[in-house]
Amino acid sequence: MNELEQYRKEIDEIDQELTHLFELRLNTVLKVGRYKKQHNLPVLDASREQAVIEKNISRLRDKTFEPQVTTFFQSMMDITKETQVTLFKLEK
């Protein structure tokens, strides 16, 4: 196995873990969505989103990745908001 193949293998292993964790996150997001629906709360909580981003930026060892982590978490939260909106529509 050459160096490039080894790096790709590492990425595949990381992606496998990310997929599992993202699935767990989405399942929890659905629980949050149901709670919000039962309590007539909006899907968007901008202050919570900003707190999530800031918390995860603070966890970075290499702060040069701050823009990428910000984009990653914002994108992930956009997907989860869409998931909650879809849930609300399906459970009417």
Image (cartoon, rainbow, N blue to C red):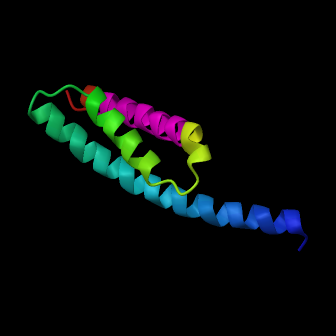
Q: Nearer the viewer, residue 27 or 61?
A: 61
Q: Residue at x 61, y 58 (%)?
A: 15
Whether residue 17 sits left or right of residue 12 in the image: it is left
Q: Nearer the viewer, residue 39 or 49?
A: 49
Q: Of all residues shown, which one is farthest toward the left? A: 39
Q: Quadrant of residue 40?
A: top left
Queried whether the magenta region covers residue 83, the answer comes back as yes
Q: Residue at x 84, y 65 (%)?
A: 5
Above or below, comparing residue 44 to residue 23 in the picture? above
- Residue 8 image position (x, y, % from top left): 77, 61
Q: State whether the magenta stretch is mostly helix, strand or loop.
A: helix
Res. 70 visible in picture:
yes
- Residue 76 image position (x, y, % from top left): 46, 39
Q: Quadrant of residue 39?
A: top left
Which quadrant: the C terminus? top left
Whether residue 83 sits left or right of residue 63 in the image: it is left
Q: Nearer the viewer, residue 3 or 50?
A: 50
Above or below, comparing residue 42 to residue 52 in the picture? above
Which segment did they paint magenta?
Answer: 69-87
